[in-house]
């Protein structure tokens, strides 16, 4: 068993990463293939599933082609929505979590008298990211597209099915759809009614460590792997990042900043915030993660690079040379409809107090501070919900920048640890894969013990600028309260489908 290898396939928002691990977590091979995020109309954020399938094959061949892994396990970006026909082939594009066309429907649902009842059962806040809300929007606005697929699911169900596995929804990704009752671990009747579906148009829910079939001959040829290799369902990339960071014991908070960002705390029973600010998603039958996701993470730096005409390394260098607080410039970096902790998406991107003296470095620093300040709001929501935070561990593409690492510690106001290079969600998927085929004991304690192989190699303490960032965090909340309606009206003038959201963006109980 010590010589066995495990292949993890992480189907992310902008790329698929495949990593071949030993059973002790050493990396034997890696592959990474990117794909575009298309915006064919205002608010849309879609992808071609066939392009993703090709990227999966390329990444797998680079990481493990020609080897014989004991198992292939999967991670995937959560909240995607994809319809397929009876043969499992796509019917239309993948609607990613970033697709905001359902923002008006989300606002209507949040205005209901019982608006908090559904997310208290499902653990998923009502927001345009949610597959439930997307389905309700499709039902109203695109009824032919709503009716066409034989089944609805996410990108992982598509990849697993084409690879040779059974059509199945792992309980982790299912818990992020807004359609699953957390306590009963089944599709929720009210959610199905709102989505306009019957349960037979969704896949059966399985455990995250379940073996859901074997690699078929066609996929084996494409991936250059042996046919018959067991396939383990795996989980959503967010909960798996906790596992991959060793953040599955009480009090250890995982922070990730990639395209988007999130803070997640592992708990031993479903944890529901009565005010609706936090999500709760399953990792295993004995572990859930509670936290909040921010839509605007690394995508903000990418936008700055495209808009300001400079590569990201140059922008980071200029931002690092700019004083904390960007000399009075405050940015609300909501380039895409924002999520936690308000979940209303009503306030767009905003610069406040922009002066002639402000340079590109000021703008970039303010944007990155804004990303971290949004995460600070999530951290404070966890504390306010009586969730104890004893340690923070961080991962994601942002961690390549020493400046951004320190900025996160400064803004959160707590020490932040960085780990020894484990591949986050991919390593978490590998651990579930090992559990699924018996290379690891089936208990949650065994998972936690295995995750303890992850070591923290650097811990950054908050610097002298931390108190100033705490004050700016309060200003961000004030901006939300006072400008959301103004900005919402401006958004509606160029994005008509958001009009119904503007009247409720600052008053919705569930967004607080």
Image (cartoon, rainbow, N blue to C red):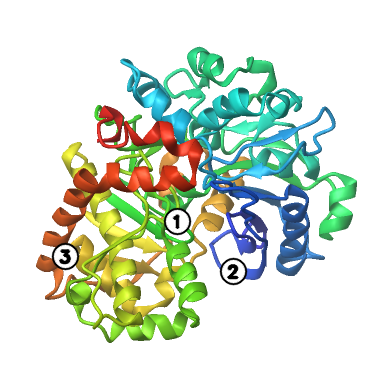
Front one among 387 and 375: 375
The residue located at (49%, 65%) in the rendering is: 422
Q: Along the line of sight, which residue is nearer the eye, 356 or 235?
A: 356
In whole angstroms, how far apart are the C-alphas of marks 3 and 2? 38 Å
Q: Residues within 10 Å of mark 3 (few under 14, many from 20)?
A: many
128 to the left or right of 14: left
Secondary structure, mark 1, is loop
Q: Which residue is mark 2?
A: 27
Residue at position x 67%, y 43% from top? 94
What residue is shown with label 1? 260
The part of the image, by quadrant, that contains residue 330 is: bottom left
Q: Is residue 169 above or below residue 450?
A: above
Q: Which mark is residue 361?
A: none
Which quadrant does the C terminus fall into?
Answer: top left
Q: Position of residue 114 (x, y in %)?
A: 33, 16
Residue denoted by label 3: 469
Q: Residues within 10 Å of mark 2 (few under 14, many from 20)?
A: some
The vertical placement of 441 against 365, above or below, is above
Question: In this figure, what is the number of numbered marks?
Answer: 3
Q: Quadrant of residue 489?
A: top left
The residue located at (84%, 60%) in the rendering is 224
């Amino acid at each position: 068993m010590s010589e066995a290898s495990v292949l993890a396939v992480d189907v992310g928002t902008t790329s698929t990463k495949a990593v071949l691990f030993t059973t002790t977590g050493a990396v034997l091979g890696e592959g990474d293939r990117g794909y575009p995020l298309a915006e064919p109309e205002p608010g849309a954020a879609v992808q071609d599933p066939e392009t993703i399938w090709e990227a999966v094959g390329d990444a797998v061949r680079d990481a493990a082609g020609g080897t014989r892994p004991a198992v292939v396990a999967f991670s995937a970006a959560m909240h995607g929505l994809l319809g397929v026909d009876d043969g499992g082939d796509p019917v239309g594009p993948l609607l990613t979590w970033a697709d905001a066309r359902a923002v008006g429907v989300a606002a209507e649902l949040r205005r209901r008298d019982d608006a908090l009842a559904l997310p208290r059962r499902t653990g998923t806040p009502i927001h345009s990211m949610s597959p439930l809300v997307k389905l309700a929007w499709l039902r109203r606005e695109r009824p032919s597209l709503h009716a066409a697929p034989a089944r609805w699911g996410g990108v992982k169900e598509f990849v697993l099915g084409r690879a040779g596995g059974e059509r199945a929804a792992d309980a982790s990704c299912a818990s992020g759809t807004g359609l699953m009752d957390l306590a009963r671990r089944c599709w929720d009747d009210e959610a199905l009614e709102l989505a306009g579906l019957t349960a037979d148009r969704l896949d059966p829910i399985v455990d995250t460590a379940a073996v859901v079939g074997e690699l078929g001959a066609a996929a084996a040829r494409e991936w250059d792997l042996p046919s018959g290799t067991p396939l383990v369902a795996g989980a959503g990339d967010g909960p798996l990042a906790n596992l991959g960071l060793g953040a599955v014991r009480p009090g250890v908070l995982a922070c990730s900043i990639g395209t988007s960002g999130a803070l997640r705390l592992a708990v031993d029973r479903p944890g529901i915030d009565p005010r609706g600010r936090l999500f709760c998603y399953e990792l295993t039958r004995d572990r859930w993660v509670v936290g909040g996701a921010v839509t605007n993470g690394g995508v903000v730096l990418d936008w700055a690079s495209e808009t300001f005409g400079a590569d990201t390394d140059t922008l980071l260098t200029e931002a690092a040379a700019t004083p904390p607080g960007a000399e009075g410039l405050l940015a609300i970096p909501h380039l895409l409809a924002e999520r936690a902790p308000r979940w209303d998406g009503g306030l767009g991107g905003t610069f406040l107090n922009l002066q002639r003296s402000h340079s590109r470095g000021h703008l970039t620093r303010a944007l990155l501070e804004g990303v971290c300040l949004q995460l600070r709001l999530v951290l404070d929501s966890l504390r306010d919900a009586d969730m104890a935070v004893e340690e923070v561990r961080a991962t994601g593409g942002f961690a390549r920048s020493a400046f951004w690492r320190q900025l996160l510690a400064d803004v959160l106001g707590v020490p932040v640890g960085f780990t020894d290079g484990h591949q986050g969600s991919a390593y978490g998927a590998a651990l579930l894969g090992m559990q699924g085929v018996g290379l690891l004991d089936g208990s949650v304690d065994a998972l936690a013990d295995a995750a303890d192989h992850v070591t923290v190699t650097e811990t950054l303490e908050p610097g002298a600028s931390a108190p100033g960032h705490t004050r700016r965090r309060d200003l961000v909340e004030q901006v939300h309260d006072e400008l959301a309606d103004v900005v919402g009206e401006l958004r509606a003038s160029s994005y008509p489908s958001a009009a119904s959201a503007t009247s409720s963006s600052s008053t919705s109980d569930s967004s607080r």
